[in-house]
Amino acid sequence: MSLLEIKNAKLKIDDKDILKGLSLTVNKGEVHAIMGPNGSGKSTLSYMLAGRDGYELESGEVFLEGKSLSEMEADERARSGLFLAFQYPVELPGVGGMSFLREAVNSRRKFLGEEELDHLAFVKEARKVASKMFVKDEMLKRAVNVGFSGGEKKRFEILQMAMLKPKISILDETDSGLDVDALKIVSDGVNAQRNDDNAIVVITHYQRLLDYIVPDFVHILSDGSIIKSGGPELALEVEKNGYAGLINAA
Amino acid sequence: MVATQETIDKVKEVSSTYKYGFVTDLEAEKAPLGLSEDIVKFISHKKKEPRWLLEWRLKAYKKWLSMEAPNWAMVDFPKINFQDIYYYSAPKTKPKLNSLDEVDPELLRTYEKLGIPIKEQEVLAGVAVDYVFDSVSVATTFREKLAKEGIIFCPISEAVQSHPEIVKKYIGSVIPISDNYYAALNSAVFTDGSFVYIPKGVTCPMELSTYFRINEQNSGQFERTLIIAEDNTYVSYLEGCTAPQRDENQLHAAVVELVAMNNAEIKYSTVQNWYPGDKEGKGGIYNFVTKRGNCLGKKSKISWTQVETGSAITWKYPSCVLKGDDSVGEFYSVAVANNAQQADTGTKMIHIGKNTKSTIISKGISAGKAQNTYRGQVQIQKNAKGSRNFTQCDSLLIGDKCGAHTVPYINQFTPHARVEHEATTSKISEDQLFYCLQRGLDTEQATSLIVNGFCKEVMKELPMEFAVEAQKLIGISLEGSVG
């Protein structure tokens, strides 16, 4: 059974067709990259998968480990192991990073039938993971994403991913707003979590992220559907010829 | 934020939204219905009060008759029929004040249901508690230990007997009988409340606390609290309130007076959870309360912290009169109004002495079709040179049918002072909710988390054990407001 299966997904926003029959299969242990120009439907795809209000499918279906997502709310999908690293992480004034993380982790643990972590055990675990991500303790004490730099926000996203241990992670333009050093730290964080039991979908505009997070498959998204799939070499083709060449050829 | 999961669990285990809505089956002794000079005399007689206090009450009653109910607040309710209220209601089995064992077990069970088992609280929390049930104070714990320090903590009706000279000197000294309509009414018919006296140089070794409970139908609660802190003292005091769920409105018109001498500090915290009425606005408590503190001494400090989640209508403005030079007034407030609740609350900071300082942090949360108004006055008098005020009023809206209003009054009579006012209004955004949901939190959890984050500056002012309780309350009172 595949981990994530998108079958002929169609979605409208304000009467405009955004996804026009998108299909994708992701198996355990795989990293997929979805590349596409602006307006091709990349962010819509990630919101649709995560179950955001207003992004319900018009037709088609999505399965997570064989289970249809259509009846599942966003929080249930998250607890089931679907993680979205936001392109623009949201500020939560007054909400401490550590408390937020703990609530999130314990929601997932409860769902999995695991014991919830008490404060001490949690802090210990969070610090361990944070130090690997070069996230300082001080950042965990601050309010979630408030006053964070672009790099800090993305590192905090990946830290959450590491703590939540999702089955499938969708990284939405995680490279945007990052300089080379930050890009490397974030990519290392993601790579450290790759294993045979999970999968990652990297959504990106540029090829450069894929130098650091090397995908097994690359898909070109254009005008609401995948027009071409291939190996890592496809990303290099985009880098060389731009999207226009590929889209015209398709 | 640690409490949020507990909040959710709590909400789920409670079948009705208001968990304190039960009624205790106690026989009560009531005064005849309605208000008259005879009723005032009846109350005074019941309490075996000295002549001066009866006269003071009667004067207040006459004053009240000549006054009109205030109508400037942004609240809307039918005219109160003051003849349709019981002004005195006491549990019939009169408890002995010094021994908990002799308190009616039914009454003790009520407090247990409220989550405040008297004995447990006494032992575990080390908090000295006074319990006021309808009109009568039923038990005050830890009195002996406090007495060793010279601290008096007892029902005010008892203080009238045991320390008449102190009561006579200070009662009405901060809030005169003619202060306002409801204060005059309270002065005429107040039944009980707490009395605290901290002698010179004493730091009160524990939190003092009072729990108020309205039980009887159609009865009003008119408690009166008086706290006096002599030179070089510190005391922290907390009050909590609940009432049963009833279809008709009930009146709560309390008066709280605080007096702080030189270098004295009084910290007064309130967690108010009177029954708010149902979703359509039927029933609920009218919470019309006058609270004021006099910073009489130099370098004295009075700090009000309030978390207001209950009541159908809240009308209260805990204030500080900063007479002593270098005295400090603080007001930290969270007011939650959901469904059909109306809250008009804020503070007054009256700067009279030199170099006086005040801080106002107000967080208003509106949900459902509730209206929430901050109304505050900062007055810097002519001689208050070098004085400073900082005011921050933040409003959070949940949904699109509620309202938030900010009405600040600033009167400055000297140029040698600084007054700052900041105000913001925000909504819980779709983005914030979705972000939390995507991390596996459900809607209630997410709302509670975001709201508690919004209130953080105020919550951190509450004594630790009550901050947890207050967080839970906020979660519960906003249940169902999102999604």
Image: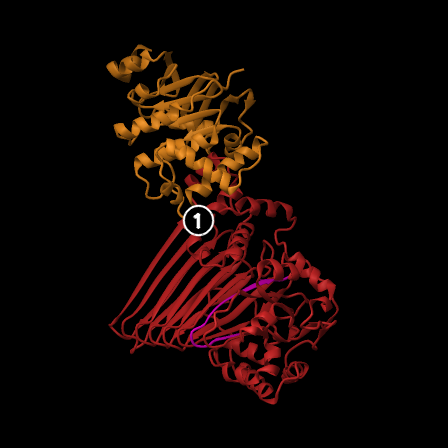
Chain colours: A orange, B red
Q: Residue B459 magenta-drawn?
A: no
* Residue at 60% in and 47% down: B10
* Residue at 41% in and 39% down: B431
Residue A51, visible in the rendered structure: no
**Image side of residue B68 versus residue A181, left or right:** right
The amino acid type found where label 1 is placed reads: Gly
**Image side of residue A83 versus residue B159, left or right:** left
Q: In this view, does A208 lie above or below B171?
A: above
Residue B239, given in percent of the width and then of the height, sits at 55, 65
* Residue at 52% in and 39% down: B442
Total numbered labels placed on residues in the image: 1
Q: In this view, does B212 lie above or below B452?
A: below
Q: What stretch is highlighted in magenta?
A: B226-247
Quadrant that contains the N terminus of chain A: top right
Q: In this view, does B148 lie above or below B118?
A: below
Residue A65, visible in the rendered structure: yes
Q: Is residue A167 above or below residue A102?
A: above
Tag 1 secondary structure: helix
Residue A181: quarter of image = top left
Residue A114: quarter of image = top right
Q: Mark 1 points at which residue?
A: B453
* Chain label for disc 1: B
Residue B426, given in percent of the width and then of the height, sits at 39, 50
Quadrant that contains the C terminus of chain A: top left
Q: Which residue lies furthest to the front in this view?
A: B148
Residue B149, given in percent of the width and then of the height, sits at 53, 73
Near-viewer residue (B315 or B330) = B330
Residue A130: quarter of image = top left
Residue B393, given in percent of the width and then of the height, sits at 38, 58
